[in-house]
Amino acid sequence: MARRAFQGRRHHMTKTARYTSEAAEALVARARAAVPVLAAHAGVTDQQGRVASESLEVLREAGLFALGTPVEFGGTDVDLVTQVQVLSELGRGCPSSAWLVTISAGTKDHFSRLFPKEVLAEVYAQPDVRWCGGATPGEAVAAPGGSRVSGRWAYASGAEDAHWALLSVVSVRDDGVPQVGGALVPMSELAIDRTWRVAGFQGTGSHTVVANNVFVPAERMIQLPRGLGGAPDVTLGEPLSIVSQSVAVAGVLAGAARGALDVVEAVVGTRKPPISPYDSLAESASARHVFATAEHMVTSGYDRLVSLAGRIADQAPGEEVTDVQRSALRMELVSVLQQFQRAVDLLLDLHGSSAFALDNPLQRFWRDLNVGARHAQLSTYLTTENHGLLVTGAGGPLLMG
């Protein structure tokens, strides 16, 4: 079956002319400079199930929570390549901290356009405002001047440190047809049920947000546009928006793999292999082979991810993207993530069982990578099933966005 490959142009800075390559490089440098603070407090972040206050502050000072904020309100608007580079640097220090940056930025960037200017002016009184979100629909009941919202939204990453929550809701129109939309609610009006007890990404505090008959003014309620067949268009008319968000999320996981590589690289010349004549891993030809293989997998995987981000960022406004092309991008993304997972497994084999001591950051990078790689946007088996349907002509797209 013939199909046109998705090809981007060469220049990545296409999202906005206001953010120059020099400014993008400076943002990446600020992210890199924050890594020592994030790494120093990553253990505390993991243990307390919430990003350490010192880490939140260094991210704020670096302007990284302004990502996703509209530029007219002092935000930082960069292309997808720069996002991946920034998030990967942060992930080297603390994947949980990097996760909060990407989730807040992605939510703000995707949904801000749907709200009127007066709402945005209120919400973005400070450009480093943080959002969390919940995708499982709650209920919105019409009330004078707005709606009454109730429900529970699990996996709201960073809820305890967010200022606003964008909550998916379903309302019933006058004609009886359910309408999917969202409610933007101050966190001060919501409760948090601390349900996030998991093996990895513990520091993201992805708890359950709870609303009980909370009034939301009409101007802070949105409705999703409808796509083919009348289903909600979660892409908001931008075919690659959900794939782009998935690639940004993968930037954090690239950082986890790079952080794991950093840990082993620091000891490869001094760590003695158990029950062997070697004084260090570097003396063993087998250990050198394993390390070289893992190093290449991590670095080439990162290069692949940056290249993928560039091809997406280079899409011309209005350029047609077919379902097959979009699916192929998803397939490449999950392939990169699987490469990171295999590489970190090799690094654990090389380091040995002491890597699983709770004070060893290697096990935290491994846990965070493996939990994050199972995020709903990165489902390997559904991505593959979707691609199989499309390339064999057996059916239409399985995945929305």
Image (tube, grey):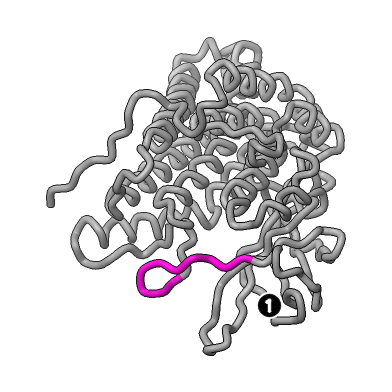
Image point (61%, 22%), residue name: 28
At numbered mark 1, what does the secondary structure look like: helix, strand or loop? strand
| 276 with respect to 119 (left or right) | left
Residue 344: % across, % down: 54, 34
Image point (42%, 42%), residue name: 333
Image point (58%, 22%), residue name: 24
Image point (43%, 57%), residue name: 401
Which residue lies most toward the left here? 1
> In the rendered image of this protein, does residue 152 appear above or below residue 347?
below
Residue 387: % across, % down: 30, 55
| 8 with respect to 78 (left or right) | left
- Alpha-carbon neighbours of circle 1 within 10 Å: few (<14), some, or many (≥20)? many
| 236 with respect to 153 (left or right) | left
> In the rendered image of this protein, does residue 259 appear above or below residue 390?
above
Q: Splitting the image into 4 quarters, where does residue 355 fall?
A: top right
Residue 173: % across, % down: 57, 83
Residue type at tag 1: Ala
Q: Read off the magenta span.
A: 222-231
Q: Which of 122 and 324 is in front in this view?
A: 122
| 92 with respect to 296 (left or right) | right
Residue 145: % across, % down: 76, 75
Residue hosting label 1: 140
Q: Does the magenta stretch include residue 226?
A: yes
